[in-house]
Amino acid sequence: MKKISYFLLFLLPAMTVTLSCQGLGGHSFKGSVTGAANLQVLLEQVYFDQNTPPVALGRVSADGSGNFAIEQKEAFAAGLYRLTIGAKRMFFVLGGDEKEVSFKGDINTLEQMQIEVTGSEMFTCYSNVVKEIVAGGKMTEESAKGFAQKGCNPLMRAFFTTQIFGRSAGNYLELFKTADKALQSDMPQSKYASDFSNMVGNIEKQMTQAQPQSSGPIQIGTPAPEISLPGPDGKVRSLSAMKGKVVLLDFWASWCRPCRMANPHVVEMYNKYKGKGFDVFSVSLDRPGQKDAWVAAIQQDGLVWDNHVSDLQFWNSAPAGVYGVRSIPSTFLIDREGKIVALNPRNNLEEELLKALN
């Protein structure tokens, strides 16, 4: 059985919850984390459109023993949450019926969800599934599908589906549609349901618009047309200047969710092979006047290579027209001589990259 490496957003550096007993009573979220003494804590609700509004009174400081608490009169809404302590982050799900949620753990093992949770069945369920995923290492396609279904409610299952299969969403569209249908039924008219539905619609649209690899003006074996555009700093960068390296030419945009979901894999490959002559040349199809969004996305996604360019002309981007790009993400792998050697190597990027590097 072929092993598959999946991107798991919820395994970001993990930490948890908040301090400051305001005497509000009602509902609370508490934590005790070894190694978190006096660190800043932020609790945010997370949506599928990447909007992360902070919870009211959710920005506090842990005390000298790493204890913290957030209290509010009303219950914490059912949903997906992100807890940040210092530089550590942890995602979890609440069911909306919790009175007092608490957990304890060590800051060095929180990203493996090595925590003890009380007061929330949904949080406990989420933690247990993540622990199981971490313990299992690399997954097969079948086991990955099984993990995605282990969530204890439709929102959790939709989130697991996004995190496990998001990088190859187009190949698993039916899984996303199934998760969408369940979420629409369970949380109708909620922002979670509408955001997820929009995301699935965008994935399907991208799949519909994607043209066959052989129909565009660029063919395997042809020289890569020159691209020479300014970067965020105004400095002009040229694709031809990278001759001698194996280059992934990546058309993307800050507003393109499939692009953003694909970025972690590109970053992974860049970090793994940059020392062997691999580099990335990123062309953004961001809109006129959206330079700030472009720059922010570069920083947020950790796209640390220098070669970022754009004419900020959206779908009227000149390079996109030359390369026949009608949907994004769209990628071209270029060998050391400047010739195209692979079209849209998304699911087999490492395989194609190794062939070009050898």
Image (cartoon, rainbow, N blue to C red):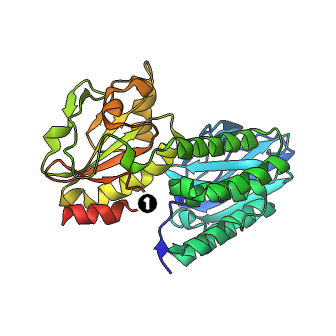
Return the x and y of residue 67 as percentages of the image width and height.
65, 55
Seen from the viewer's position, the closer of residues 72 and 345 is 345
Residue lying at the far front of the rendered structure: 215
The residue identified by callout 1 is: 347
Seen from the viewer's position, the closer of residues 227 and 312 is 227
Whether residue 73 sits left or right of residue 327 in the image: it is: right
> Residue sitting at 73 percent across and 56 percent down?
178
> Residue sitting at 26 percent across and 65 percent down?
354
Seen from the viewer's position, the closer of residues 111 and 324 is 324
The quarter in which the C terminus is drawn is bottom left
Return the x and y of residue 299 as percentages of the image width and height.
40, 39
Specify the quadrant of the image occupied by residue 277.
bottom left
Whether residue 192 sits left or right of residue 232 in the image: it is: right
Q: Is residue 98 above or below residue 130?
A: above
Residue 30 in sight: no
Amino acid of disc 1:
Asn
Residue lying at the far bottom of the rendered structure: 1
